[in-house]
Image (cartoon, rainbow, N blue to C red):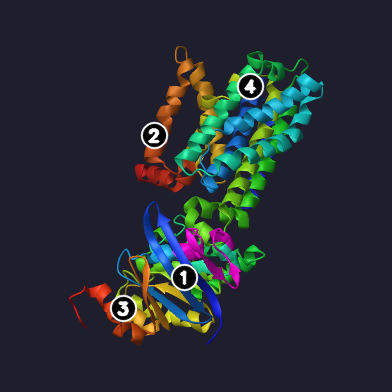
Amino acid sequence: MKKPLIPLAVLAVLAVLPFSGLSTYMMHILILVLMWTTIGMSWNLLGGYCGQVSFGHAAYFGVGAYTAGLLYFKLQASAWWGIPLSVAVVSVFAFVLGYIVLKLRGPFFALATLASGEVLRITTENWNGFTNGTLGILIQERTWVAKTQYYYIILAITAFTFLLVRRLVASKWGYYFVAVREDQDAAESLGIDTTKYKTIALVVSAALTGICGAFYTNYMGFIDPHIVFALHDISIITIMIVMVGGVATQWGPLVGAGIMVLLAEWIRSIPGLGASHQAFFGVLLVLIILFLPNGIVGDFRKITRLFGRARA
Amino acid sequence: MSESLLQVKNAYKFFGGLAAVTDVSFEIRKGEILALIGPNGAGKTTVFNVVNGFYKPSRGEVWFKGRNISGLKPHKICRMGMARTFQVVKPLQRMSVLDNVVASAFLRAESREKAVEIAEETLKFTGLYEDRDVISKGLPLGKRKRLEIARALATQPELLLLDESFAGLNPAELDESIGIIRRIKERGITIFIIEHHMKVIMAISDRIVVINYGQKIAEGSPEEIQANPAVVEAYLGEDHHA
């Protein structure tokens, strides 16, 4: 198959899937896979291509989710307006945060992003008057009962993100992102304004993640600080999805999200093991780092070679 | 005498209490090859870093094309027309040789096509075209040094700073690199070079600045420098007389 046709083929398959009589539960799983794919692709832009490993994407997810939630809760507007509004709110937020944390390099940047997510969680939990605190926000009336509409909305968001990231990576910005990742001093001396391009990568990545947060509020109908600002369930899972799928690869986030969501659901369904799915994720991450450091997509040749040898 | 492209005026650089560069002044004229030499640890790379903006001079000024650039960020100075290579090579490791050069060619290119065109031309010029699809991590040292030069050239500089681009090269690679430097000069690009290899320095440079312990001890043509007792002393020790 010709290369440009692969994304179209994947999109076509995803577009007709709801017509194949899937159960409500399966539709729910697919929606989660697509949402995580989008978050993974956004993280990949900043962490994979630009090399700025963020441990705090829950911050952007949460701010997006609360933008939608508060719009409904405070202004009685439809939470769907949160999707366009979250782009603006999260972009401004990421820009300001980036001004502080992007001066740090490597592990210090990672720790600062981790802290920013936690600070937001604790703030949201305690700022009762504004955020309703730990009680969270409940959307009283759901827009649709069926899953199909939600599925197509997240599919559109995912397709848009895929195209955007693909175009960015092939452009001048993409080259500059990778140059920053490989060596910031060399990039500077080649005339690349490293602070500027790191900020761009951060803001785009954050805004796309924020859209997913706003979608989440509409889809789930309930958010609280513990869910949307979660370190382990959002920030860390985002990194795992990209690591498992393949850092700085086009299809890595989709593959990673598919595996992680299905794995989480499967482990949760095993009696007595349910709560320990995080432990399994940890083991999986260790195995990936040891044997497939470039992820399933990045090390695909290695995998096929292994199986080829086994058969011969 | 041709006009001056860069002036370093009474530059100092302190690290804590340590003076790495003390009251160094010199100028680079348009079209020449100026070499900066001195024993190990004399402060040559520090001078480079002050010139290209990695360090702001603690005191003194750097002027480039008639503008005070002290304290400007390296990317701004590069945009003005100054590019450099690194002594410890810094290729963009997980990018191919071509992509390395494309990334830097984007500085002056409007489109990707234009950037690729500039990059391919630069790779042919530096003799790396055959290796364009190699991931730069896998290049041998000699070619990595040349990739540094190619990458700097692709930003289309007026002044090129070369930090020990000849160290660790074998005799064949050495001759090849000397040829490349000469051809860069023929293109009208001014070159400021740090080098240990005396044979190379004497062969290619128009003028030489010598520093020791962060201070300038001599300046002149290769012949003058070779005959300068202060230089001989700095390199060989006090009791040795040439």
User: Whole-Å distance between the Cαs marked 1 and 3?
Assistant: 18 Å
User: Whole-Å distance between the Cαs marked 3 and 4?
Assistant: 66 Å
Residue B95 showing in the rendered view:
no
Q: Is label 3 or label 4 in front? A: 3
Left of A5 or right of it: where is A248? left
User: Whole-Å distance between the Cαs marked 4 and 1?
Assistant: 52 Å
Q: Chain of mark 3?
A: B
Q: Which residue is mark 2?
A: A287
Q: Going from the N terminus, do you reach mark 1 or mark 3 first?
A: 1
Tell me the amino acid under the disc marked 1.
Leu
Q: Chain of mark 4?
A: A
Q: Quadrant of residue A85?
A: top right
Determine which of the numbered discs, if any, sits on residue B198 in the image: 3
Which residue appears at 31% of the width and 75% of the height? B197
Q: Chain of mark 1?
A: B
Discs 2 and 1 carry the same chain letter:
no
Q: Is label 2 or label 4 in front? A: 4
Q: Is residue A61 above or below residue B23?
A: above
Q: Position of residue A224 (x, y in %)?
A: 64, 19
Q: Which residue is mark 1?
A: B161
Q: Nearer the viewer, residue A28 or A52?
A: A52
Q: Which residues are magenta?
A: B48-76
Q: Chain of mark 2?
A: A
Which residue appears at 37% of the width and 68% of the height? B215
Which residue ends up furthest to the left in the rendered image?
B239
Residue A286 showing in the rendered view:
yes
